Amino acid sequence: MMGLMQQRPLLISSLLEHAELNHGEVEIVSCPVEGGTHRYTYADCARRTRKLAKALERLGVWDGDRVGTLAWNTWRHFELFYAVPGMGAVCHTINPRLFDDQIAYIVNHAEDRFLFVDLTFVDLVERLIDRLPSVEAVVILTDAAHMPETSLPRVACYEELLAAEDDDYAWRPLDENTASSLCYTSGTTGEPKGVLYAHRSTILHTLAASLPDVHAFSSHDCILPVAPMFHANSWGIPYCAAAVGAKLVLPGRDVSGPRIHELMLQEGVTHSAAVPTIWLDFLNHVESTGDDTGKLDRVCVGGTAPPRSMIERFHRLGVQVRQGWGMTEMSPMGTFGTLKRDMLDWPEARKLDVLVKQGRPAFGVQIRIVDDNGRELPRDGRTYGLLQSRGPWVTSGYFKRDDTPIDEDGWFSTGDVATIDPRGFMQITDRAKDVIKSGGEWISSIELENAAMGHPQVAEAAVIGVAHPKWDERPLLVVVAKGKPPGKQDLIDYLAGHVAKWWLPDDVQFVDELPHTATGKVQKTALRERFKDYALPTA
Ligand code: ADP
């Protein structure tokens, strides 16, 4: 017997409709690239977003068309997040920090018909436009007063497009499986690959991501997403905020520690999400000024593993840390690190042992670890294997490619190596290609890096495997020092207190800077290339 409940489609437009009707007075504050502060409400936003949908129709945007964006986190980008999918097209967020060739590849692969770009990226598009045959026009996200001189052949001004429309527009009653947005992985592992989200997957992700053991969003919150809207939809926060009616603070271009801190105090931010490099800058700033963090209650850290010391530093400020693990391919949420009830009374050190793990899956995502033959491995917290995931917001296949690593039961291979403990907590030990294979055993580069980052004279650390005649590979620790570099032996002795003896790096190298990807991760491929002929003293 079938149930007798309504089959209302799960659509992104319904989030904004909900926010307009029930949280119409709540503010969205942005930092425009033109300077100053922009403030308006969900009600204003919804009206403008309907005008934008009409403007898109007038441009000739139609079902399934890809509309590219090159933009920071601002209210105009937020409007595109809703208007483009709401009228049946696909909002393709492009990461402007990628190399020119990657951006050209992505725009061409996606066949973007229009690009909506912040003033800061006009140069970039001018440089590339001859290589982007699918792009019919470029819309600059600004008003008439700030329109730049440009060599672009077909340009329009965003505010003028909106001014020409009224807001009498009804959102399309789309099939909930209609494509809504498109985001390419940054290509840390080869060519960028497109992940095509749907309305349904986005709504389910929004509901799960807002849960108490995940971000715990509510109408009491003021959320500052530092995670860029061009990378995995700012981890889904622009949708969650509308769903719960939270105040939003969109930081624009300047995401330095001091600026984030200033915004937090000014706007009463309770929750913020960013990668560890941003939080490092933030913590250094706050600690050096001795300031407090205002109403900040919790931060989400993701993208790469935060060092234990970072969690401790936030705790000293009275701020909770919620580590998130995910991937562009997973919308991006997979697991979240929050304590369980009985853990709340544990001593701090034991709590930290849990919080450094990547966390438990939110309901909706399944994870498991398998061996090289795809056989499931035990959830004992010790055995590590290849991490797989599946669920309604996990990709079922990359856009226009047939090489997505998914098995017949729908398990997607994440490329990460992890353990899962009996209580559900997953811990990444490495990306499969970064793991160091020493004498047939695996050494976790991440664990070594985290341990090294706990040393007071280490600002940043990366560990790579270097060829060794006897052991195949042995770890080399590459360090950016904080102030005066520590002695090599000092550092190794320090690590000896934290990791197994046979894991200890065979050597330490000091560098001024580590190479980073466009999404702020250490670029291990570049590092391996740089040290490919390195002769270890133990070899
Ligand atoms: P990109 O390769 O484009 O940066 P993603 O953001 O999709 O792409 O990166 C996903 C990968 O980032 C994961 O597979 C994992 O290796 C790493 N990652 C994400 N969050 C964490 C975390 N909290 N701890 C460790 N690694 C993480």
Image (cartoon, grey):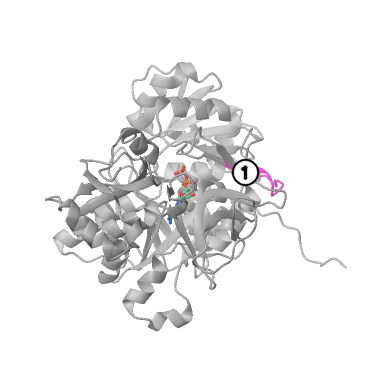
* Quadrant into which the N terminus falls: bottom right
Task: Based on the picture, tell me whether residue 179 belongs to the magenta stretch.
Answer: yes
Left or right of 279 in this view: 42: right
Is residue 264 highlighted in magenta?
no
Residue 313 in picture, x, y percent from top left: 26, 65
For this view, does 490 lie left or right of residue 464?
left
Q: How many marks?
A: 1
Q: Is residue 166 visible?
A: no
Horizontal and vertical percent position of residue 429: 44, 56
Question: Which residue position is annotated with label 1?
Answer: 405
Quarter of the rendering occupied by the C terminus: top left
Mark yes or no: residue 78 visible.
yes
Tell me: 296 left or right of 485. right
Q: Residue furthest front?
A: 470
Three-letter code, disc 1: Pro
Mark 1: give few (<14), some (14-19) or many (20+) Cα within 10 Å.
some
Which range of residues does the magenta coloring cover? 170-181
In depth, the one of 410 and 162 nearer the eye is 410
Vertical position of residue 148 compared to residue 336: above or below: above
